[in-house]
Image (cartoon, coloured by chain):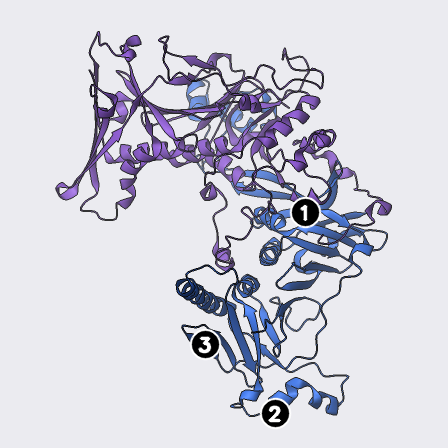
Chain colours: A purple, B blue
Amino acid sequence: MTTLSFSLAPRAIYQLHDALMCLSKFGDSVAIEAEFDLLRFSVLNLTKTAYSAFVCEAETFFETYSFGVAMGGGSSRAANPNKFSCEVLIKALLSAFKAKSSGRDKDTAIERCEVELQEGPSDVECKLIIRMICGLGVIKLYKLNYEAVHVQHAVFDKSSATNQWSIEPRYLKEITDHFGPSAEQLDVYSNHGKTVFTSFTTKIAEGKEVLRQPVQTSVAIDKRDFEYYLAEDNLHIVIFLKDFKAAIAHADTVDAMITARFTRPSRPLQFTYEFEGVKAEYTVMTRGEAPGDDLPDSSRGAVPQLSARQTPAPVRVSQRSTAPDTRQMPPPPSRSRSVRPLTGTATRASQANTESQRPPPPSVEFDSLFVPADDDGQWDVPNEEDEAPAEDELGWDATGDQTSTGPGLRNTQPSLEQPTREEDEMGIPPTQRMSQLHGLGLFD
Amino acid sequence: MRFRTQVANASTFAKLTASLSSLGKVCWMRLEEGFIRFTIIPDQGTQVWAQLPVDSIFEESTYVLESNTGVINLEVPVGALHRALRSAVPAKLSSLRLTKKGNIPLLALTIRTTSWTTASNALGIPDSDRASSSSTPTTTAAAAANADPDPDGDDSAGTAQPRPSGPRERETVITQEIPVKVLHESAVEGLHQPHCRDPDVHIMLPSLMQLKSISERFTKLATESKTVAAGATSTASPKLELSANMHGSLKLAIVSDAFSISSVWTDLLNPSLDTCGLEQSAVEQLPSERLRALPADDEAGWAKVRIDGKDWSRVLSVGRLNPRVVASFINETALVLYVFLPGSWNDEESCLTYYINSYSI
């Protein structure tokens, strides 16, 4: 029998709630791993491109913490006797910890939270008992079912990361505030004392569709804004904006300096920060383009017919346990090719196509991360459910318009997809022959 | 073809585009020497024709417009433009130019914002680790502190050294690239402002905020009662009845099977028309003057239009610009709003004109 019980002070309850909120942006269920000196909450997303984990130290984060395993137990989890792991739906866990927001009533405010694991002989009886002890003797009791699982971790070798920077998350948050709500990806590179963050979407449009092109936003900040900066110039790293926003939003709420470590495109990038006995880490897959052609990247310089079947480069995942388990995750499905290294111009074209056919990402509300509505908002029209979902999307079909992403458009792709065109376009005046413009109707 | 300018009044520009974007997704932006025009012609609903002098939103001295015809016509996704302009509102300096990337013409909005870092080292004292690590005399430490600003952080590509953390101005450069379409003159020459007969009543509208909230309240009530009564959701949104007379009264009403409500404003201003060039007899023949002659309590003195509640709410979103609005009623036909931006009262050059069709019963 495994025994696990711990208790939390109100402040830790809030922090756990915030951490779970952040994790819920990566997946639906959270893996909980207990060891003698720590408790880890982690989520690996469905496409296995992002892994996020919060490690709570037993000594500092909890009021009390006790974990014990009976040696020689016959369960399948005996492979690692010093560890217990299970999986719980984040929503269920959040609903228990959500109570923090109802702190208006001072008398029945939460004073303590006790969590206990109840392992039964059959899976049905396995429960996580959460006891919220409130004022005036009110006790809120939650019993959640859990599933014992083996947990996969994204491995990241900090010592081999050649690039690193640290910055206050509020600067990054200011940057993302300028991005459009429909932007999907983020390109980061530095040049001449500036670091440029560019948001873009790999959607293509032609002809009448031109106006549906997403707005591309780039924000350049001074390297001096970073607390620490040691990274190669002109190294383009591309990650999903959603993951980036989730990480910086949480880092901002706990006001912790965030550090990014990475080596080169198509290798994982890791964000880390620490606060009050909790270590947060986010390991995300990157795409992008290196400045030189000298990197030993297998797909660099490949012929245009680069097959989509080429070995994908998913987040490197190691199974901590060697025991065979039916719940072990299958090899990355074919759709995970969206994390395939994106290196050559030609491969980028086909990449964009797979990208646009990818099912839309789960709809997570990021509204709170954007520029807060000022007084101006009262003039907005209410009940605009019949309006476009995103204001700069012009009614783009979110299900992915197959007709506009057909292979015929590949030729146009490289120029459209170039997210980081240098600023020096300034000097070249736009020219367009009038003769090319006949027959363009207004509002057609 | 060249267009480049600095944005002088990003806040007004952002509010203008916000109001326009509630009525349509695509806007025809016509750049001329001296004027900018914004036009929205949606498939259905209200048309807007806005004309502004260049200096109301742009810095006239930096306004560069080069084109064979002296005019540039652009088709602009106005919502995206608005979103981009929101970044420019708090900024000191922003510029807008027409450029292209590949085959796609773009309006590139470049914004420079500055802010102050937090004053963690307000007195400019050298970093503690620097001070503690230097066992040298204080004069050397002071010299090191003085030398600090010189490197300016530009050599930082490889430096791991902590920088001075005192407050300083930090600059952020934001570039928003909005895809646009360049329209040939021939594509727009067939577009004209709607023509309508002389109005029956013209009246200054009361506070748009008040009008908007009451209108929305009415619309909501009617929508709810309709869905409850009919049990099925109807796609048509409720129609508001808006009427006015030449004696300063405006009435907003809604009638449904279940109820009939109305709000009446009185003592509003009926502005006099610019009648120069018209003979006295012709002026007296104007419909509005005939209605003015009728007594205030005469029902015949009212002009009425029926307008779509939701569309009206979108139109009233122009209230964010804090304008003065004259409504011209053409009985049972149309409502035309002349929206004058603050500081441009009675200035024909700067006016947003809304054309709203009246629905028949």
Question: How far across and how far down the image is residue B107, in percent?
Answer: 70, 45
Furthest toward the left, the residue is A137
Of badges 1 and 2, nearer the viewer stands: 2
Q: Which residue is mark 1?
A: B95
Eyeballing the image, is A314 above or below A111?
Answer: above
Q: Which residue is mark 3?
A: B263
Q: Indicate which disc residue A314 carries.
A: none
Furthest toward the front, the residue is B231
Mark 1 vs mark 3: same chain? Answer: yes
Q: How many marks?
A: 3
Between A440 and A256, which is closer to the camera in this rendering?
Answer: A440
Residue at the image point whose x is 41% and y is 61% from the top: B231
Q: State left or right for residue B44 relative to residue A31.
A: right
Mark 1 vs mark 2: same chain? Answer: yes
Eyeballing the image, is A324 above or below A87?
Answer: above
- The type of residue carrying mark 1 is Ser
Residue at the image point whose x is 58% and y is 43% from the top: B113
Label 1, label 2: how many angstroms apart (C-alpha)?
Answer: 53 Å
- The type of residue carrying mark 3 is Ser
Of badges 1 and 3, nearer the viewer stands: 3
Question: How far across and how far down the image is residue B164, in percent?
Answer: 50, 29
